[in-house]
Image: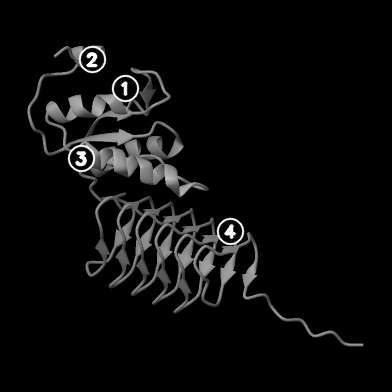
Amino acid sequence: MTLSPIFAELPDFSFDPTAVLVYGAGGHGKTLVELIKSMHIYHVVGVVDDHVPAQTLIAGVPVLGTADILAECYQRGMRLAVNGVGGIGNVGVRLQVFEILAKQHFTCPAIVHPSAWVEDSAVLDAGVQVLAHAYVGSDAHVGFGSVLNVGVCFSHDVVVGKVTNFSPGATLGGNVVVGDYTQVGMNASINLGVKVGSRARIGNGATVKADVADESVVRAGAVFPPIKTTHTG
């Protein structure tokens, strides 16, 4: 078997439990490279991307190649990968990356920025990403592959499904439930006890005060449900 040229510059090593790949060389992927470095637990061996040329540096880490290189990486002892495709506006592309990694037998660890705080009773499933200055409260449960971006705040007993995405500054009150594949925009807030369905989209700056059905859209800046006004003659 002929190794890819990029590996000619790397040491030959067997299984390394701290080695991790980042799949995706865009903005989210770059952020995750920096996050993983800051954890001082794993070391990023390289980035995988289907559109960026090999040996391009992403936050100082080389692109190794496209998805075709994953089998070779696995053979060389790599077992961990992080999904660096955010999927904002199209959760399908993020799901596709998870499927590609699963087929190549990679495991996706949960990663947490050192400046974030996750209470001891909270549960983070595999593949969860908690970015800088985020907070996850007591007895919260964050589903597989979900993203809590910078400054996101989950209060106590929040439950969110798999592959959800919370943009910077999103805030959830206590006992909020959010379904699978839902996306919540920047600085949006969801009030105490509200349930948001699957594949819903909550726009930037929206305030949600009542339950939101599956696949519903709450527009940016809106208050849901709308405030009733009284007209006087």
Density class for disc 4 (Cα within 10 Å; few <14, some 14-19, many ≥20) is many
| Relative to 129, residue 1 above or below | above
Q: In the image, is 69 to the left or to the right of 12?
A: right
Cα separation between marks 2 and 4: 43 Å
In the displayed orientation, state which residue is furthest to the left.
14
| Relative to 166, residue 13 above or below | above
What number is the disc on residue 106?
3
Q: Cβ–Cβ below 8 Å for labels 4 and 3?
A: no
| Relative to 116, residue 191 above or below | below
What number is the disc on residue 4?
2
Residue type at the position of mark 4:
Gly
Provide the secondary structure element on which disc 4 rests: loop
Q: Cβ–Cβ below 8 Å for labels 2 and 4?
A: no
Dot placed on the residue nearer the N-terminal end, 4 or 3: 3
x, y percent for residue 8:
19, 12
Provide the secondary structure element on which disc 2 rests: loop
| Residue 35 in view of the camera | no
Look at the image and tell me in which quarter the N terminus lies.
Answer: top left
Q: In the image, is 155 to the left or to the right of 90?
A: left
Residue ID for mark 1: 65
x, y percent for residue 2:
17, 12
Provide the secondary structure element on which disc 3 rests: loop
Q: Cβ–Cβ below 8 Å for labels 2 and 1?
A: yes
Cα separation between marks 4 and 3: 33 Å
Density class for disc 3 (Cα within 10 Å; few <14, some 14-19, many ≥20) is many
Cα separation between marks 2 and 3: 19 Å
Dot placed on the residue nearer the N-terminal end, 2 or 4: 2
At a point 53% along the width and 56% down the height, the residue shown is 185
Look at the image and tell me in which quarter the C terminus lies.
Answer: bottom right
Residue ID for mark 4: 203
